[in-house]
Structure formats: C-alpha cells, structure tokens
Amino acid sequence: MSRATSRTSEAAAVKRPRKKVDGWVVLDKPLGLGSTQAVGKVRWLFQAEKAGHGGTLDPLASGVLPIALGEATKTVPFVMDGRKEYRFTLRFGEARSTDDQEGEVTAVSDVRPSDEAIRTALPRFTGEIEQVPPAFSALKLGGRRAYDLARSGQAVDLKPRRVTIERLVLLGRPDPNHADFTVTCGKGTYIRSLGRDLAEGLGTVGHLSFLRRTAAGPFREEAAISLPKLEALGHNSRLLGALAPVATALDDIPALALTETQATRLRQGQPLDLTRDASPSGTLCRAELDGKLVALVRSDGVAFKPVRVFNL
C-alpha cells in the first residue's frame, strides 16, 4: 500500500461534516483496493453526502471505476447498464478457485494453444453467450454472497446467464503461457469466467493474471484520475474541478430543451403535455433548462412524465 493510500485510510476514520457535492469522479482504481473501499475514500475526500459506483471492480482488477456523488447517484443505472471495455491476460496451464491469481490451483495442464487456435476459437465467445459466474463473486445465493459460501467450503451452484460479448481480440502472446486480449461487453459479463471458459474451449485450463477496465459507459481511462492525484488536490475548489457533470452518464439520451415554466412543472413532479412534435411512447429524454439538467422524462404518447428529478 502506498503512503498516500495509507494516509487516506487513516483519515477515513475521522468524521467530517458532509456537503452537497454532485458529479462523477472517474477513478483509476489501483490493485488491491475493493470498490466499496474506493467509494468510501472518494466520498471522504469530497465530504459528500451520498456516493455510489457504476460497476464493481474486483480488488485484483485496476482501471475505470466511475464514482457517483450526490445527485449523480440517480444516474448510476445508466452506467451499470452501459458497455464495458477491458484488457486482460489469460494464463494457460493453471485453473484457480477464483479464476484469477488470488485463488488456489485446482487443475493443471501441459497444453498451450497456438495463436491460430486462439483466433479460431474467439468467434465462439462473441455475441450472445452463456456463462457461469465465478464461485467467488458477489452474487447472492439464499441471501448470502457466493464468495462467502465458497470461502467457507460450501458448494456454490450458480446458474448460467446470458451475456453479450461485442468484441474479443487477441492482442499478443508475451510467452507460450500467456495471451493478452481486449474485450467489449455488456452488463453482467464476468471476464474471469470468459478467460476460464476460453481456456477450456482450447483444450486446456487457465485463469486471469491481469485485468484492467478501460471504459465503463461514457467514462474512459484517458479521463481517469488516480487516488494519490485526488488526494494531492486537497479539500478545495481544485478537487471539485476533478468532477464530471451529473449529465455525463446520460450522454446517449436525447436532450429536451425546457422553458422556465416547464422546468418548474417537472421539479414539482408534474407532466408536460406533448406538442405536435410528439415523441413515441417510451421515449426517454434528459430535460434541460439552459443546458442544466432538470429531470429525466419518459413519453407515454400523451405527455412527458418525470422519471427522475434532479436538485442541481
């Protein structure tokens, strides 16, 4: 653990007054830090009243962890449902209980697939596929987390789930034991499961030795900031300058320009009658006044009704 991270950990125990802070922090999560811990550290730095994140990253994974503060927590589902991108390294020849480096070795194999064999296999793992989540995951079985059951030695019977792999590409082979990939996928995909299943499909066994998320919804690693850099900004306006607007999570949703009267109606929870430029039933829009987010609204074919109202 770095000295900066250690200082934040110690400081997190100190109670501080909460403030109204609204926006997204695109954190470059370091290895060894859990997502919940990361949210707690960022919330403490900003003294924010509310905080959440846009998709869990395992402690042994690094990269983009979007953290929502204040009113941005209302937009978390749109990031959770968005596509994700990862880089990962698959280590052939060893299966592990956690499907990554943390677990115990459960099987070994001398088979090392060729580059050609890997590229030939990739289409079978692209598109809509079924995968069984790792036994060491946060999914619940009978009210308990799967990883708690697995750690206590109990059987973990997780059912296959359909997930979408949009793109899976072999980047290179550092050596015969390893292969580097990039993947673009949909909600609920476990990259550890993908690596495990790919190795088995190639007639061997394997686990992830490296995993980094490079994008989550509209947030990309180019815009991510490390925890030490956030800490160095201090507790002032420079820190607030690291925030992305609440509406960033809604970039793919069309905007609806409001008048002052319409904005007031939405803030009061009242619908807006559709004009002649009627939107089809089910249409979702982000309603804005002078470029400032007021509400998320959905058309029922007659009116726009507020789904989420923002206090910004």
Image (tube, rainbow, N blue to C red):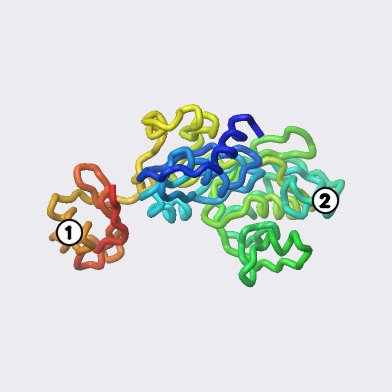
10 Å crowding of disc 2: few (<14), some (14-19), many (20+) = some
Residue at image position (29%, 60%) is 283
First-in-chain label (1 vs 2): 2
Residue at image position (43%, 56%) is 77
Which numbered dot is residue 107? none
Q: Secondary structure at mark 1?
A: helix
Camera-nearest residue between 282 and 267: 267
Measuring from the top left, give residue 51's x and y in whole percent: 45, 49
Q: Residue furthest bottom?
A: 142
52 over 87 or under it: above or below: below
* In this rendering, the label closer to the viewer, 1 or 2: 1
Amino acid type shown at disc 2: Val
Cα gap from disc 1 to disc 2, whole angstroms = 60 Å
Q: Which residue is mark 1?
A: 265
Measuring from the top left, give residue 119's x and y in whole percent: 67, 44
Tell me the quadrant of the picture where the N terminus can be found.
top right
Amino acid type shown at disc 1: Arg
Res 285 seen here: no
144 over 24 or under it: above or below: below
Camera-nearest residue between 202 and 72: 72
Camera-nearest residue between 82 and 31: 31
Measuring from the top left, give residue 44's x and y in whole percent: 48, 42
Question: Would you say 45 lies left or right of 116 here?
Answer: left
Q: Which residue is mark 2?
A: 105
236 over 88 or under it: above or below: above
Residue at image position (84%, 47%) is 111
10 Å crowding of disc 1: few (<14), some (14-19), many (20+) = some
* The quadrant where residue 131 appears: bottom right
Question: Would you say 239 lies left or right of 94 here?
Answer: left
